[in-house]
Amino acid sequence: MWRPVAVGEVIAERNFDLKRKRGRPSRVTVSFGRPVQEPNPDASAPWFCPLSISGSGLKFFAAVAGLDSLQSLILALELATTMVPVEVGRLGAEVQWLNDDERLIFARHTIALGADNALTALLGRLKQASAILDAGTPTSSTARRRAVQALHAIGASAGGRIASKVPRGRAKQ
């Protein structure tokens, strides 16, 4: 299968500060090439977005395949997000962009990760509460009451966005 062997026309580039425990700071550059297809492609030929990571002793190249030029570019951006810290880590160093430890290519990862973790914790608590309520044994009335209180607290934390009315035919616990 045909693949590009060089970055070619650079369409985007980012320079990072490489920080070692000892020694001078230096630069690492990630370059993204224009997505390309093989010469004379057929309708099913993939697109490739070439990328390179270089500087401070690093030399990494990949040609990331996608169904179209945009997908190959997005996948190359994701690969660079993963590979820059890996490659720099092999040197026993760290890399930063604009003095920030944030995700290097796609920023705001920390915020998204926090939201993802909060959602996972919420769903776990809802699963626990639902298991307690589903059990429905007379000896579990204290546990059911706590589960209902926890569910009301979750609803209250959502503000006015979630209705907190008890469905008809159900008594409040």
Image: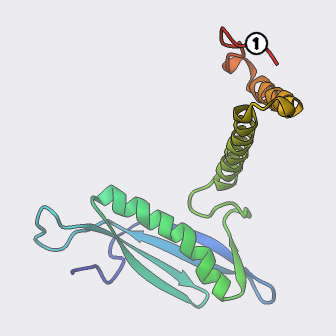
**Amino acid identity at mark 1:** Ala
In this rendered view, identify the residue nearer to me: 40 or 45: 45
- Using the image, determine if residue 73 lies above or below residue 18: above
Q: Could you tell me which quadrant the N terminus lies in?
A: bottom left
Image quadrant holding the C terminus, namely top right
Residue at image x 72%, y 41%? 122
Q: Position of residue 63 (x, y in %)?
A: 36, 76
Whether residue 25 sits left or right of residue 29 in the image: it is right
Q: With 58 as the anchor, is 127 left or right in this view?
A: right
Residue 170 percent location from the top left of the image: 70, 13
Colour convention of the picture: rainbow
Residue 78 or residue 140, whichever sits in front: 140
Q: What percent of the width, then of the height, locates residue 119?
A: 68, 43
114 and 55: which is toward the camera:
114
Q: Residues within 10 Å of mark 1 (few under 14, many from 20)?
A: few
Where does label 1 land, which residue?
Answer: 171
Q: Is residue 12 visible in the rendered structure shown here?
A: no
Dot 1 falls on a residue whose secondary structure is: loop
Q: Residue at x 49, y 64 (%)?
A: 78
Residue 101, located in which quarter of the rendered image?
bottom right
Instruction: Give residue 34's quadrant in the image.
Output: bottom left
1 or 27: nearer the viewer: 1
Find the residue positioned furthest to the right: 142
Residue 29 location, quadrant: bottom right
Q: Is residue 69 visible?
A: yes
Image position, residue 32 (x, y; %) = 42, 69
Q: How many marks?
A: 1
Instruction: Check the image and name the residue furthest to the front.
Output: 138
